[in-house]
């Protein structure tokens, strides 16, 4: 039914596309903006920045979040920083270089036009955040400080100790609360979106469940914006917060929104290794640590010596050895895979031999402990709290863990999905990171989408509906959606099985990690395609959800989210199986160079795979959006 | 090294906001000292579900001590015995075999219990909405390096901005004041050059909104002890100073 996908990328040179497009898009005049209702689902960086900006412009905005406060959204946990092409360090950075690094870092699987726009507006984000009072790190002269980050040879990352996401989110949250006070934004906390409502092929609203009372509520609007984050929790163990899920995006997918590149998942190289079966999540140690820490394992297999007793000659600084130009600062996918290789070789460290060392002794000898403490103190403290080991005296142990998902709902240049009126921002969309995201680029993209892209593009859609009131919530489409939610709740409560939702989530996570993790192959993916639905069937027959639907019931909340993760996991496997190449975070063992590097197949796979829902029990249809590279020459990524 | 310990828990169970609550005793046996406090509760909940009992409702999200969602009174201490540590970052190595642990929700009139250990903290959002921002519309900002900020000033503002909004300060305060929460946000913004334009309006509005919802601060200092981010009560002193000035200046500015 869908032809080849049209991303509606404006004509013209790369440098002028966004400027020209901003001029050619239709505007909604200030007096008319208040006649439009916009729903924003999610209150993280993308959602809060979008809602605040739309409120400032005069739209009537409704923010829906399942958190108790918008400030809890998982953007808050981002540690390292935010990239911007300010070139404050005079080290040769530019919009073009940030664009180039991002395209290359994404292994040539992102749209040039989107990425260039991202680099272009990156500078405005820093200005905006600073004006809001975000306390970025500063030099003694009072100007902003920068650090370098993986995948780049310039220092363009702005940071706020190890809490950059927190500070940027609090900035966006404060802007949002200002609009709440001004009456332009209506805030609904503890409201979980469970259905997208469509009318005449357009998105016209959503249905939520109040997590405290169980009340099922319809919300109508002229446009719906999803800013609901990524799906890393499909692995159960990830660095995502416990409540992160794919449900809002998935429910939109089930109503026709295409899901793009689900197999592009990012494994972050610097996380604390898992320690036991009861582990509920993995904790990330910011990638910025790789600036000063050196990664190594013993040369010898099963070297049982204390790290201090292993002399330099017996250590293998494997990233510095293999990639002399970038060393410990190679992109995340490269760092992660190399860690997996040495651990698989039996050279892992720690009680379970499931980690590699990240060693600061050299940096402390060079700069002094005080400097290291000032830069990373809170990260070191966190590490010690979790492991009981002091990283000032014992090298940290790290291992990769799922951290970010590049795939997401398909959107065009204006961030609108193939469903008219449904916009998708931040990690929830697939747009800017290709097959691998560079460090400090998630915060950049979330805020670019919310502050500087959507506020322009949404007007271009809304201007068609001037004078049309939003569809009333008494329309049958809303009643039907409400009924669907009520039925779903009753279904979970009536199964009466024997095992908890968490039990099945953990089992699902093991399958996804084993077969669709850091390295994938045909046999494993085919197993995933048969085993995930089998486990899902058991889940639907045997899950135990106690209690009722009219109270705060956390098992009930999780039941639907895990069901959606099952369907997503199966789609990830199909996507990974179909993509017969290795690129970025998607590493197919069949497709690698002799040195074990990812081998792309540009002839056959320089495209986005966007999957269309065909109903339960029927595999999705794969559509393609061809990626055209007019400015950057595709090459084998090399960080040597 | 990790070992296994056996614990007796006394947990506050309350079916809903209007319902009456009570303590229920649970045995938590074979808990690894490497588990976090919340993972210990996860294990207890798994066992409850297996036995057909509804699990204990408690809130958490990031489990990295940054989102501020979690928060329990553990043996009468907000976030438990380890200083500067949120509940999710507290590990069972802080406890010993045979310990008796009393687990309650935050206790404050302004934080009504929703169910078991979960409370409603929306009053804190109301304080932020009353003035916890710098009014700068998207797109209106000058270049970020136009205004230098002395490093010391930026660092001190950051110390205040580190607040995670968990509400432990309220729970620990004998008056249930949210003064440390309020002062941290007031001073984060008041210390910075960008925050000067609204300094006096912000201070008066936020302090008075705090007073509207919460109790008054009488300088007990319990909040500083309970704060998982070690935010010092110096910020309260500075806010009190700013508040007195604000009362004069705002009157003068009003003519």
Image: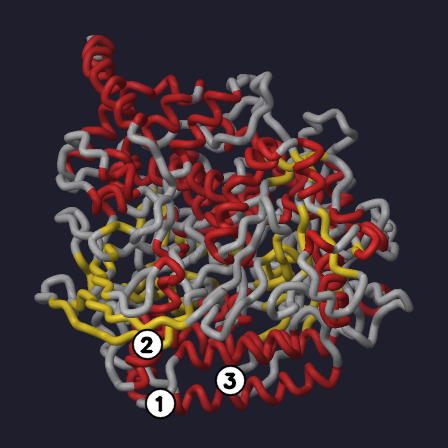
Eye-nearest disc, 1 or 3: 1
Badge 2 vs badge 1, beta-carbon distance below 8 Å = no
Q: Are marks 1 and 3 on the same chain?
A: yes
Alpha carbon distance from label 2 to label 1:
22 Å
Q: Which mark is residue B29?
A: 2
What residue is disc 1 on? A498
Residue B16 visible in the snapshot? yes
Q: Chain of mark 1?
A: A
Residue at 35% over, 45% down: B83
Q: Quadrant of the C terminus of chain B?
A: top left
Q: How is the image coloured?
A: secondary structure
Q: Is residue A422 shown left or right of residue A83?
A: left
Residue A568 vertical placement versus B180 (above, below):
below
Where residue A484 appears, x then y in whole percent?
34, 77
Helix, strand, or loop for circle 1?
A: loop
Chain ID of residue with mark 3:
A
**Rendered residue at 43%/36% (across/down):** A57
Question: Residue A212: which quarter of the image?
Answer: bottom left
- Judged left or right of residue A616, residue A365 is right
Q: Earlier in the sequence, mark 1 or mark 3?
A: 1
Q: Nearer the viewer, residue A67 or A424?
A: A67
The disc placed on residue A616 is 3
Q: Which of the two residues, B229 or A551, is positioned nearer the viewer here?
A: B229
The answer to whether residue A62 is seen in the rendering is no
**B232 in relation to A561, above or below:** above
Q: Is residue A119 left or right of residue A408?
A: right
Residue B182, position as x, y percentages in the image: 27, 34
């Amino acid at each position: 039914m869908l032809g080849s996908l049209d991303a509606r990328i404006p004509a013209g040179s790369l440098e002028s596309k966004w400027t020209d497009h901003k001029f050619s898009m239709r505007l909604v005049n200030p007096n008319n903006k208040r006649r439009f209702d916009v729903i924003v689902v999610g209150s993280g960086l993308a959602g809060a920045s979008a809602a605040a900006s739309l409120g400032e412009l005069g739209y009537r905005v409704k923010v829906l979040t399942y958190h108790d406060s918008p400030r809890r959204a998982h953007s808050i946990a981002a540690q390292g920083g935010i990239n911007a092409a300010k070139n404050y360090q005079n080290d040769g950075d530019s919009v073009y270089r940030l664009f180039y690094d991002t395209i290359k870092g994404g292994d040539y699987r992102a749209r040039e036009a989107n990425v260039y726009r991202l680099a272009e507006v990156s500078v405005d984000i820093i200005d905006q955040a600073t004006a809001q009072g975000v306390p970025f790190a500063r030099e003694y002269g009072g100007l902003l400080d920068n650090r370098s980050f993986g995948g780049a040879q310039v220092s363009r990352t702005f940071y706020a100790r190890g809490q950059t996401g927190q500070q940027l989110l609090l900035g966006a949250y404060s802007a949002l609360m200002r609009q709440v006070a001004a009456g332009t934004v209506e805030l609904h906390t503890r409201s979980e979106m469970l259905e997208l409502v469509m009318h005449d092929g357009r998105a016209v609203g959503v249905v939520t469940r109040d997590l405290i009372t169980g009340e099922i509520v319809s919300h109508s609007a002229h446009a719906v914006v999803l800013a609901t984050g990524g799906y890393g929790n499909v692995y159960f163990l990830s660095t995502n917060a416990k409540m992160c899920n794919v449900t809002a995006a998935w429910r939109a997918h089930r109503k026709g929104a295409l899901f793009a590149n689900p197999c592009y998942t990012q494994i972050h190289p610097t996380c604390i290794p898992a320690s036991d079966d009861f582990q509920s999540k993995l904790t990330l140690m910011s990638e910025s640590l790789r600036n000063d820490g050196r990664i190594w394992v013993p040369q010898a297999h099963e070297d049982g010596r204390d790290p201090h007793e292993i002399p330099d000659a017996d250590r293998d600084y494997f990233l510095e050895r293999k990639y002399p130009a970038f060393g410990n600062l190679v992109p995340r996918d490269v760092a992660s895979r190399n860690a997996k290789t040495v651990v698989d070789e039996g050279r892992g460290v720690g009680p379970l031999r499931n980690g590699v060392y990240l060693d600061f002794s050299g940096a402390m000898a060079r700069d002094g402990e005080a400097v290291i403490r000032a830069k990373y103190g809170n990260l070191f403290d966190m590490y010690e709290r979790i492991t009981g080991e002091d990283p000032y005296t014992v090298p940290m142990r790290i291992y990769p863990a799922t951290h970010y998902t590049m795939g997401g709902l398909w959107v065009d240049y204006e961030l609108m999905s193939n469903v008219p009126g449904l916009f998708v921002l931040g990690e929830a969309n697939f747009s800017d990171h290709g097959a691998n995201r560079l460090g400090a680029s998630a915060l950049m993209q979330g805020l670019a989408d919310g502050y500087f892209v959507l506020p322009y593009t949404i007007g271009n859609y809304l201007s068609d509906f001037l004078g049309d009131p939003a569809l009333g919530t008494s329309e049958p489409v809303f009643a039907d959606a409400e009924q669907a939610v009520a039925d779903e709740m009753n279904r979970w409560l009536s199964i009466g099985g024997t095992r908890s939702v968490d039990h099945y989530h953990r089992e699902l996570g093991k399958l996804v990690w084993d077969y669709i993790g850091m390295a994938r192959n045909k046999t494993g993916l085919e197993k995933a395609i048969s085993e995930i639905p089998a486990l899902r069937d058991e889940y639907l027959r045997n899950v135990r959800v106690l209690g009722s639907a009219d109270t705060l019931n956390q098992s009930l909340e999780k039941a639907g989210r895990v069901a959606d993760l099952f369907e997503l996991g199966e789609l990830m496997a199909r996507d990974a199986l179909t993509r017969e190449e290795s690129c970025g975070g998607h590493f197919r063992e069949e497709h690698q160079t002799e040195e074990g590097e990812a081998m792309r197949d540009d002839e056959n796979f320089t495209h986005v795979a966007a999957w269309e829902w065909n109903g339960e029990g029927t595999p999705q249809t794969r559509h393609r959006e061809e990626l055209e590279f007019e400015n950057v020459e595709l090459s084998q990524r090399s960080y040597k | 090294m990790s070992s296994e310990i056996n614990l007796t828990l006394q947990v506050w169970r309350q079916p809903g906001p209007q319902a009456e609550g009570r303590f229920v005793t649970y045995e938590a046996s074979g808990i690894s000292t490497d588990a976090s406090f919340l993972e210990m509760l996860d294990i207890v909940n798994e066992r409850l579900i297996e036995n057909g009992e509804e699990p204990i409702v408690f809130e958490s999200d990031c489990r990295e001590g940054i989102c501020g969602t979690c928060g329990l009174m553990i043996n009468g201490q907000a976030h438990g015995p380890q200083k500067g540590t949120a509940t999710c970052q507290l590990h069972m190595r802080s406890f010993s075999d045979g310990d008796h642990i009393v687990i309650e929700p935050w206790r404050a009139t302004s934080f009504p219990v929703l169910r078991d250990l979960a409370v409603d903290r929306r009053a804190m959002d109301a304080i932020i909405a009353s003035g916890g921002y710098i009014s700068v519309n998207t797109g209106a900002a000058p270049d970020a390096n136009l205004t230098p900020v002395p490093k010391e000033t930026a660092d001190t503002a950051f110390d205040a901005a580190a607040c995670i909004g968990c509400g432990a300060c309220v729970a620990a305060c004998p008056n249930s004041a949210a003064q440390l929460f309020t002062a941290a946000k007031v001073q984060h913004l008041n210390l910075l050059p960008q925050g000067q334009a609204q300094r006096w309006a912000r201070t008066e509005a936020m302090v008075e909104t705090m007073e509207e919802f919460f109790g008054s601060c009488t300088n007990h200092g319990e909040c500083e002890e309970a704060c998982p981010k070690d935010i010092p009560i110096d910020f309260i002193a500075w806010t009190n100073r700013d508040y007195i000035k604000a009362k004069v200046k705002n009157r003068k500015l009003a003519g």
